[in-house]
Amino acid sequence: MPVFLDTTDADFAAKFETLLGTKREDAPDVADTVSAIIADVRARGDAAVIELTERFDRLSLTPETLAFSADEVDAAIETVNPDDRSALELAAQRIRAYHVRQMPQDASWTDPEGATLGWRWGPVTAAGLYVPGGLASYPSSVLMNAVPAKVAGVDRLAITVPCPDGVVNPLVLLAARLAGVDEIYRIGGAQAVAALAYGTETIPAVDKITGPGNAYVAAAKRQVFGKVGIDMIAGPSEILVIADEDNNPDWIALDLMSQAEHDQSAQSILITDSPKMAQAVTEAVARRLEMLERSEIAGASWHDFGAVITVASLDEAAELSNRIAPEHLELCVADPDALAAKCRHAGAIFLGAWTPEAIGDYVGGPNHVLPTARSARFSSGLSVMDFLKRTTMAKMTPDALRAIGPAAERLAQSESLQAHGLSVRARLDSLN
C-alpha cells in the first residue's frame, strides 16, 4: 500500500523525512564493469564495439553496418502507420517551436571607461544522443533530445540505438529523420557511450552526450564526463499532484499511474487538502490498476513508493512540494497560477485539471527530459542551453586600459603573479 500521511499527525515530520530519503535507485554496482568496457573501446575501437554488440544484443555487425544507411531508414519509415506519423510530426513541430523561443541573444556594450564588453553564444560542434532500444524505445525522447540540439545549431548530431536481435522501432528512425539527426548507429550500452565520447575508426567522437539509459549507460556517462559534457544522470520517473476537492478523482488517479507505469521504481505522490479527495483517488487507483496493461509495474510502484498526503491548506502543500522538488508537478486546483508562484522547485509544472502530465511527455512543447531525485532544487530540464556555450568578449582601448589597468596590476602583485602584472604594466608604460 502507498504511504498515507497527514500533516496534523504528531509523527508527520519524521515520516515525511523518511519519504524524502527513500532510495528508489536499485541499480547494481556496475562501475568496474563499465570501466573495463570503456577501456576496451578506447583500445580497440570498432572491434570492441562490434564484439560487445554481438555479446549483449545478439547482433553481428561490421564497420560498414554500424550505422543505418539512408535506404534502411527510408524502408523502416515506410512501415510507420500514417496516424502515428502525423502525431509524431505534430510533436516535432510543437517541440521545435517551443525551443526556438529559448535561444539566447548575444550582447555587446561599451562601458564608461571605454571598454567594449559582452558575450556571444555558439553551439557545440557535435552531440551524441543515446536512445534506449528495442520495441520498447521512445521516439518522443528522440525528439526531446535531438530537436533542441538542432535548434541550437549543432553541426553534427549522432544517435545510438541498441537493436537487440536486429529489432528497431521504426518510429525512432522517423523521429530521428524529423529532428534532423545526421547519423544513426545500431549500438547501445556502455560501449555506445564510450564510442561517442572517445571515437572509433567509424564513429567520430562528439562533444556532448545526452539521453536516458540503464545502469550501465548511466555509469558510463558518469565516467566519460569531463572528456565530454553530459546532460544529467536521470533516476526513476516521478510525479506530484496537488489537488483540491473540486476534481475528478479518476483523472487524478490516471495522472498518478501515468508515471507509475514507467518503472517499478517510479514514484507517484498526491497532496490534497481534502480527506474526501484522498480517499476517492485511492479507490480510483485501485480500480485502474485492475485495467492497465502495465498493472504489475504500476502496482509495484504505487505500493512500494506511492504516497497520499493530507494537508491543512494549499500553502502547506506548496511548502511540501518545494521540499520534494518533483520532476513533474501537477496543480489541479482552482487557481493553479497563484499556487505555481509559490512552488519554487519542480522540473516542470502543469497548470490546471485540463493539463495532464502526459501532454508534456509528447506534444505540449516543453522538454520532457527533467531533473529527478530532488535535483530540481538546483538544476533544470533539457533545453537549447545544454547544446550552447557562452563565450565572453572584452576589448580595451588605450584610455580604457589606462583607467582600469593599474587595478589589475595591483591585484596581480597581491597574488604574486609577476608576469600578469608586467603584461599590463608594459602596455601602460607605452602610453606615457
Image: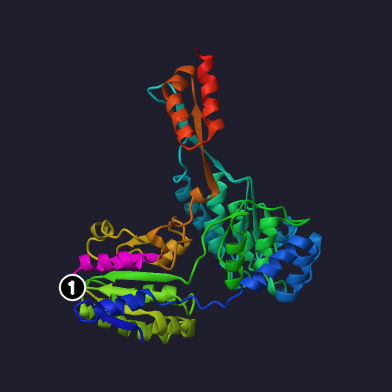
Could you say which quadrant of the image residue 290 lies in?
bottom left
* Side of 12 relative to 306 (left or right): left
The residue that label 1 is drawn on is: 312
Q: Position of residue 138 (x, y in %)?
A: 56, 67
Residue 266 in view (yes/no): yes
* Side of 28 relative to 274 (left or right): right
Q: Residue at 46%, 64% (x, y): give it.
A: 361
Q: Is residue 58 above or below residue 138?
A: below
* Side of 162 relative to 319 (left or right): right
Could you say which quadrant of the image residue 378 lies in?
bottom left
Q: Position of residue 119 (x, y in %)?
A: 48, 35
Which span of residues is magenta-colored?
A: 313-332
The amino acid sitting under disc 1 is: Ala
Q: Is residue 374 magenta?
A: no
Q: Residue at 35%, 63% (x, y): give it.
A: 355
Q: Is residue 426 above or below residue 118?
A: above
* Side of 61 relative to 369 (left or right): right
Assign a secondary structure to mark 1. Answer: loop
Q: Residue at 57%, 44% (x, y): give it.
A: 123
Q: Is residue 332 above or below residue 27?
A: above
Q: For this rendering, which residue is in front, 405 or 57?
A: 405
Q: Residue at 45%, 61% (x, y): give it.
A: 370
Q: Is residue 225 above or below residue 269?
A: above
